[in-house]
Image: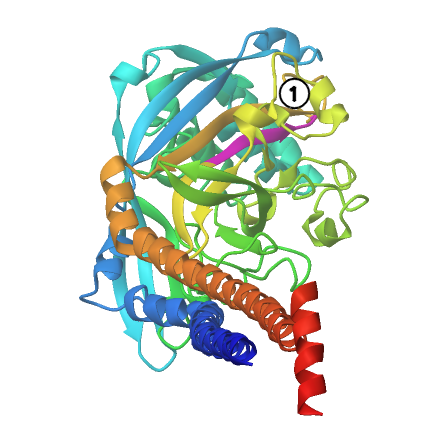
Amino acid sequence: MTDKSDLLGASEASFMSEISEVLRKGRWKSVCFALGAIFLITGVVGYALFPTILHVFLQNNLVLEEGKEAYEKWKKTPIPVTFKVYIFNITNAKEVMEGLKPNVEEIGPYVFKQYRSKDVLSWNKEAMTVTYNDLKRYHFVPELSASMSNRIYSLNLPLQGILMFLKKLPDFSRSLVVPLLEGVLRNYNESLFSFRTAQELLFEGYKVDLIQDLIDLASAFVTVPEILPNNTFGFLYGKNDSGDGVFEVFTGEDDIGKYSQIVKWNNMSRIPFWNNQYCNMMNGTDGSQFPPPISKRDVLYVYTPELCRSVSLEFAKETQVRGIPALRFATPDRLFASPLVNPDNMCYCTDEKYCSLSGILDVSPCRKGMKLAVTGPHFFLAHEFIKERVTGLNASREAHETYVDIEPNTGFVLRASRKLQMNFILDKFEEMEETKSVMMSVIPLIWVVEEAEIDEKVAQMFSAKVRTPVVIAKSVLTASIVLGILWIIIAALVTVYILLKQQKAAKAVIKSKYKVVPQKPEDIVKSEKTSSVNA
């Protein structure tokens, strides 16, 4: 009896020990679940609130307000800008006047450092806008450039300006003025093409004396308007220490989503150049900054005074600039597509001859009627009809595409490359000997590229003040979510483990209570004798 009692006591003690262990592990399981829930909820809520927190941060730091660091950098661009110009030399000028297609060669680059600043004119506290003049100053970099003394055959644009004026005259008046013009051209040895140095064709300009003589001679018959300021011409004459006009933009004080968006340009809320209000809208920014945040789905807009219109930018790819992740946005192929391809461009259609052709924008409505047209460099993405009528060009996406690389959280431009080509739409002018045989064609004049990229100092400062805190915050929140899930998984595994241990312990106790103990034969006989005596 004593052995059996001892056995049962030991089993019960073992069972109680198992129960104690189970209870201890049960508390640990609860701790795991609690920790997991805390980490997971913190991470999820943090991620949900992160855009709002970042929005508040940007609202406080990016808004245009005097005295703030962002405002000072907005006023004076810290990113160095390189401005390159390529001039097209007409190698067969005489043959072009006889009706052959022009052959061109690219001369350049002529490299300038461009320094940008904003001259703030006024603040509108009620509308939360600021008005400024965007100024650009150019310094020539001779060691990176072709010679400024290179002489180049280029289309004589001052003469084309005169011809545009003559085409608008009544037939009788034109018949009187044309002989005067031909006499002046012979007197000054001028023709359809000019032969000038690169220096004269760019910022310095050159005096066009024949214009004043023509005005003096023709004034007896017609009133000749001013064709050139100071009777001086250069593709970039008057552009140094000047701007693209007066801009009024939102400061972002009430809504960072409107930050730097254009309200007015030259005191106009809509431009007057195109055929309807859609094309006359000024959408977007001036291109130096974009309202954050930026996503791949966004379509960005930039108002470009040279084009007299807003242009769109669409996501192209992910990239990096000095180790900072960025999104590249590029001008879409349909930007200058014909209305047959992109119906939205119908209101930019001003010339029936070129209206159905893609890759060209006639900007004569905002160039006093001068038949100037903008294309991609080397007729990039232009219609074959345009390309076929000029030889010597070689377009490529890699060399001639416009793009901008943007840090998505802030809308900060890390790198940009803007490229465009200015051309003249040349057509016959039957009344003059030199122009009556020319082939209708788009003559390349110059193409320019503006390139900018943050330097290492700006990149380090940006990373320290913006990117690193954002990365750390996102990493902490991600780690919190991962830890939360991990603790919950551990708690679940512990729960399963405890349940298995409980089942095992219960089976062990039950088995020990009802176990049959085998007896020896002599014990059985002894037990029977004892029973008989007692009876």
Closest to the observer: 418 or 255?
Answer: 255
Outermost bottom residue: 535
Relative image position of residue 164 (x, y in whole percent): 60, 36
Q: Is residue 292 visible?
A: no
Quadrant in the picture for residue 259: bottom left
Tell me where the magenta segment starts and ends, as one range: 418-428
Which quadrant holds the C terminus?
bottom right
Residue beneath disc 1: 435
Residue 422 included in the magenta stretch of the image: yes
Which quadrant holds the N terminus?
bottom right
Compared to residue 521, the image places residue 502 above or below, namely below
Closest to the observer: 450 or 19?
Answer: 19
Q: Residues within 10 Å of mark 1 (few under 14, many from 20)?
A: many
Outermost right residue: 340
Looking at the rendered structure, the kind of residue marked 1 is Thr
Residue at the image position 32 percent from the left and 12 percent from the top: 147
Relative image position of residue 469 (x, y in whole percent): 31, 57
Compared to residue 94, the image places residue 404 above or below, namely below
